[in-house]
Image: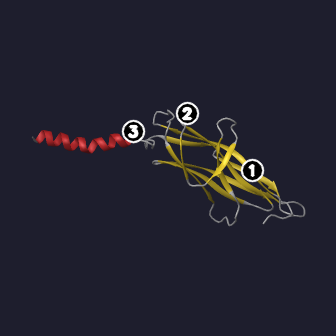
Amino acid sequence: MTLRRSLTGLLCLVFPLVISGCGGGNAPPPSGSMTISPPSTSWTVGATNPPVYEMQFQPFLVVVKDANGIPLKGVSVILSLGLSAGTSTNALMTIYLTDPTTGQPTTPITTPTDVTTNSSGTINLWVGMETGGTLNYSGNLFVYSGALQTSASLSVVCKAGTSVPCS
């Protein structure tokens, strides 16, 4: 009876660890990895007066892998955007998922948003940032899945002209 209790107790302790180590459904295992490429991007735009604003786009690839480096399909990933501390602007930063047929940005999505890795264990997306006028700001694309997280840094740099300074 004591051996049975000991084995049952051990099983109750080990079983949750085994399940969590397997990823437990829609989350990758804590020993896995997540990457985003490119890890940073910057747009340098000349200052304009009157202000002329436009969206600049950059494609990103998010890959979620297990501890053996194998991409994981069907994993839940949360995407979010945020302005960097000290940035005080109403500049627009937007995530667009990639149209699988054309490879181009689709309609913008609100963040944070939950998406799922495709059959290759990846998520293809675009980030659009508003440029022009005298905008000069930075932010981040944040990606979370289970215990994993990564980010990419984004910036818009205003290049002063002879008659138009940057703010």
Quarter of the image where the C terminus is located: bottom right
Residue contact at pointers 3 and 1, CB within 8 angstroms: no
Sequence-first disc among 3 and 1: 3
Q: Which residue is mark 1?
A: 56
Q: What is the three-letter code of the residue carrying label 3?
A: Cys
Quarter of the image where the N terminus is located: top left
Please state which of residues 72 and 153 is positioned toward the viewer in this rendering: 72
Question: How many angstroms separate mark 2 from mark 3 (CA)?
Answer: 18 Å
Q: Position of residue 163 (x, y in %)?
A: 90, 64
Q: Position of residue 141 (x, y in %)?
A: 61, 52
Above or below: residue 167 compared with residue 113: below
Secondary structure at badge 3 equals loop
Q: Residue at x 43, y 41 (%)?
A: 29
- Pointer 1 local density, CA inside 10 Å: few below 14, some 14–19, many at least 20: some
Q: What is the three-letter code of the residue carrying label 2?
A: Ser
Q: Residue at x 19, y 41 (%)?
A: 8
From the viewer's perspective, is 22 left or right of 133? left
Q: Which residue is mark 2?
A: 120
Q: Residue at x 70, y 36 (%)?
A: 102
Toward which corner of the image does residue 93 lie, by quadrant?
A: bottom right
Q: Which residue is mark 3?
A: 22
Q: Residue at x 20, y 44 (%)?
A: 9
Q: Look at the image and name its color scheme.
A: secondary structure
Q: What is the three-letter code of the residue carrying label 1?
A: Gln
